[in-house]
Amino acid sequence: MTENPRIIAGIGVGSRGVVAPVATVSPPPAVPADEPAPDDVAAAQGALTDALAAVREDLLARADAAAEPTLGEVLAAAAQMAGDPALAQRAGALIADGSGPATAIDAAVEEFAATFEAIGGPMAERVTDLRSVRDRVVARLTGQSEPGVELREPSVVVARDLSPADTSALDLALVVGIVTEEGGPTSHTAIIAGQLGLPCVVRAEGATGLADGTIVAVDSASGRVVVSPDEATVAALERRGEALAALAEDTADGATADGHGVDLLVNIGTVADAERSAQVPSQGVGLFRTEVLFLEATTAPTVEEQAEAYERVLRAFAGRKVVVRTLDAGADKPLAFAQQDGEENPALGVRGYRLVRTLPDLLADQLAALALAKERAGEDGATLWVMAPMVSTPAEAADFAAAARSAGLATPGVMVEVPAAALRADRVLAEVDFVSLGTNDLAQYTMASDRLLGSLADLLDRWQPAVLELVARTAAAGTAAGRPVGVCGESAGDPLMALVLTGMGVTSLSMSDGSLPEVRFALRSHTLDTCEQMAAAALAAPDGGSARAAVIELLDDEAKAVLAAE
């Protein structure tokens, strides 16, 4: 321990903290600088094809074996990238032009990565996964080891960045925290850390320079990594950890200190998610990401196939509510049966509800399957609500509501993740029974900022007043119309932001299982009046940092000790 410990600043994910030794992930395999041109082009192309296929199969196997469902979802998406014929074709062409197979896949991946980064938004988030595929293919072609780390004791894993494949190779029983130099608060690393309940700091520049075994304190609440922490830092994190552990004992429905109810819901993506999350004290599902069920499908699932999955989810949450999001395919969630050709900017293209323009049967079949599942589950199932993603206008909202009601689904709603929908929320709500704010995309589209570009991370801060104004406008429209307004983006799982959202008039918060205790505690510790004061303070702040600081000042003393960094 030192009197003046070194501090590495980054962006924290969550409120948890831990003290443990560092274990650094090994760097990716090197592409041979002087790889010769192949003597047998066909053989070299075959070797590359075999390596891509082997990586794809490995990723799919890891997805099936993943202990954490979200990790399985993103591994399956990475496997799709390894099986992308366009990637194989481009690398094969480079081999034909004289490149060795490792050099060819490296160059092809960098071309695709440059395209994704130029597009920005959700597509840019896929670059880490794309390069992870490249690393694993290069390792197989050259006989090198894949990136990874062997853990012998509970450790803080430090890496430049972690792809889902990197994470799946870890012994998660020995991972007590994650620190990366790259990524962002909505990156795969951050989301997986949140699902696992792990302290996490991203954008911690210089962290990979720490020697293995160095003791660090990872403080998610402050976004700090303290090297060789002093006794006071260790004691503070231990006290916070004990307090957070105690929160899980409260399993009551969500409500403020004066009894104002706020539904606390969970996000799911698969039947396995549903059956696991149904055991967690919540009031139901606020976001069922149905496209996750079909990441590996090469053809559109039938009505019967879908209905079978949906029925199991409804039965798992019998007596509660399940909000189903219709297929949000496109951009960063490509499905083989819903591809759009020739889009220069898929993040702003035909995705989500817009697929009805080109593939109307997808929505019709999904609504029919949901209605069939609801009928089969009957009184033994959950109350079913259905919502469409990427809705921009009241007319789109009206069209979706009509289609859902015609299919026999009585409670249609839409996602508000496009600024246009938030600005016209009153008219959107005149057409549907509820709305749910997807704050990740709303922030991205409002601030015109790439989620992965670290130099713009401040613009993607969930506390940005411009984004909060759009949320407040939507919530006010819901209050005026007497209709529910939920939040199912990452903001919902932030206990401080949950107070602000409640103060704005948001009626439900949907999050990962691990976030429920802290959000429930935050609400239980404050009155609705205090939440409204917090919302006003955040909206009046000049920037995101000031907004968060203003809310912390209004926290109850006990909540401040548990949820905010000292």
Image: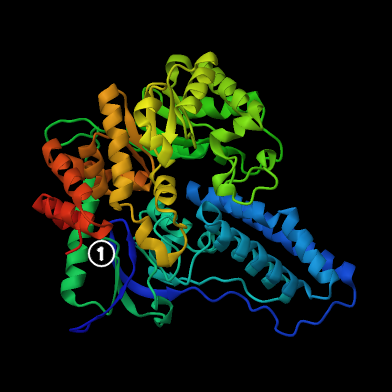
Residue appearing at x 66%, y 26% in the figure? 361
Query: Where in the figure is residue 69, as x and y percent of width and height?
Result: 49, 46
Drawn side of residue 509 relative to residue 392, left or right: left
Q: In the rendered view, would you say 146 is above or below 407?
A: below
Residue appearing at x 15%, y 73% in the figure? 232
Residue appearing at x 70%, y 81% in the figure? 32
Residue 380 in which image quadrant: top left
The quadrant in which the C terminus is found is bottom left
Number of numbered discs present? 1
Residue under label 1 = 222
Q: In the rendered view, would you say 106 is above or below 519?
A: below
Query: Where in the figure is residue 321, as x and y percent of width and height?
Result: 38, 26
Query: Where in the figure is residue 73, as x and y percent of width and height?
Result: 54, 48
Secondary element under disc 1, as helix, strand or loop, is loop
Q: At label 1, which amino acid type do we have? A: Ser
The quadrant in which the N terminus is found is bottom left
- Asked if residue 22 can be seen in this view, the reply is yes
Query: Where in the figure is residue 128, as x and y percent of width and height?
Result: 55, 63
Please tell me which residue lies in front, 455 or 492: 455
Residue 143 in which image quadrant: bottom right
Please tell me which residue lies in front, 551 or 115: 115
